Amino acid sequence: MISRDQQSSVAESAGEDLGGPEVIPSHVCIIMDGNHRWARKRRLPGAAGHRAGAKMLRRVAEAAADLGVQHLTLFAFSTENWERPDGEVRLLMDLMRHVMENDLAELNARGVRLKIIGDKQRFDADIRLKMDDCEALTEGNTRLYLNVAVNFGGRWDIVRTAQTMAREVQRGTLYPSDIDESIFGRYTSLGGVPDPDLLIRTGGEHRISNFLLWDLAYTELYFTDVFWPDFDETCLRDAIKEFVSRSRRYGARS
C-alpha cells in the first residue's frame, strides 16, 4: 500500500503529463455501458460481462484519483434497469453486494469517500445497510469523492428535488421568490458537488440515458466504442486528454 504522500506525488506527476494539474477535470462522470455486448462478443453469458464490469469500478476509481480527479460519479443502475430480466437484476444485486464487501477496504485505504445517490428504498434491507456502512466507513476521506448512482434517474432527481422544496415552501422555511438555479441545485442528489466537467459513456452509444439531467448543462461529452469491462487507466487518460484539448466557453465567446 502506498502512503498518502506517495499518492499525492503520483497525482501531481499524472496531472503534469496531461498538461498540468490545473487542467485536469475536477468532476468526471461515467455511464458504464457495454457489459452484455462485451460478453456476447466473446461468446460468454451476459453474467460474465457484468462480473468483468464490476471489477473495473475500483480500478477506474483508483486511476481517477491518481490522475488528480477530485469527484467521480458512476452510473451503476438506473431506474429503468429494473425492467431487465429477473435473473439479470438478481445478478446485479449480488454484484453490488460483492463490490461493497470486497472493494471498499482498498478504496478506503486509498482515501476514497463513497456516497450512494438514488432511491435506495427499493433495495433489500441488507443492501441498504451495506450502503450505509460503506458511507460511514469512508466518511473522513478526501482524496477522491466517489458517487455511485443506483436506482437513479435524472427526471426522478428533478421531481424529488421539486417535491422537497415544495414541502419546505409549505412549512414556510423556503420562499418561492428565493428559488433560483443555485438554490435548486443545492437540493439535487449532487447538491454541493461541483458540476461535472466531463461525462464519459462507454460502449458506443451516443446518449445520456436519463442520467444527471440538471447537472450536465455545460459538461463536455466523450463517447467511446470501448466496452466498460475494457475501459482501463489508458482509456481514462485518453478521455481526459481529449477534454484538455477542448475550449470551454459556457455560451460566451473567447
Image (cartoon, helix red, strand yellow):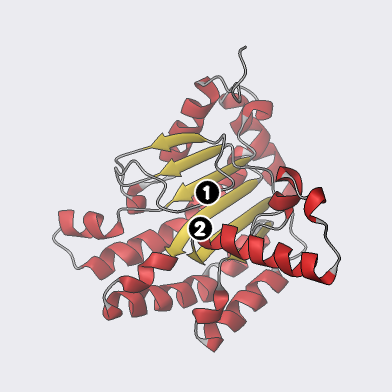
Mark 2 packing: few (<14 Cα in 10 Å), some, or many (20+)?
Answer: some
SS under mark 1: loop
| Closer to the camera in the image, 24 or 232 | 24
Find out whether the residues at labels 2 and 1 contact each other: C-beta distance under 8 Å: yes
Asked if residue 143 shows in the view, the reply is: no
- Name the residue carrying label 2: 155
Q: Is residue 12 above or below residue 99?
A: above
Count the marks. Answer: 2
On-image quarter of the N terminus: bottom right
Q: Position of residue 188 (x, y in %)?
A: 66, 57
Q: Quadrant of residue 24?
A: top right
Q: Position of residue 132 (x, y in %)?
A: 65, 77
Asked if residue 97 shows in the view, the reply is: yes
| Closer to the camera in the image, 82 or 28 | 82
Q: Is residue 186 above or below residue 114?
A: above
Q: Residue at x 61, y 46 (%)?
A: 65
Q: Position of residue 131 (x, y in %)?
A: 60, 75
Label at residue 213: 1
Mark 1 packing: few (<14 Cα in 10 Å), some, or many (20+)?
Answer: some
Q: Position of residue 99 (x, y in %)?
A: 49, 70
| Closer to the camera in the image, 132 or 173 | 173
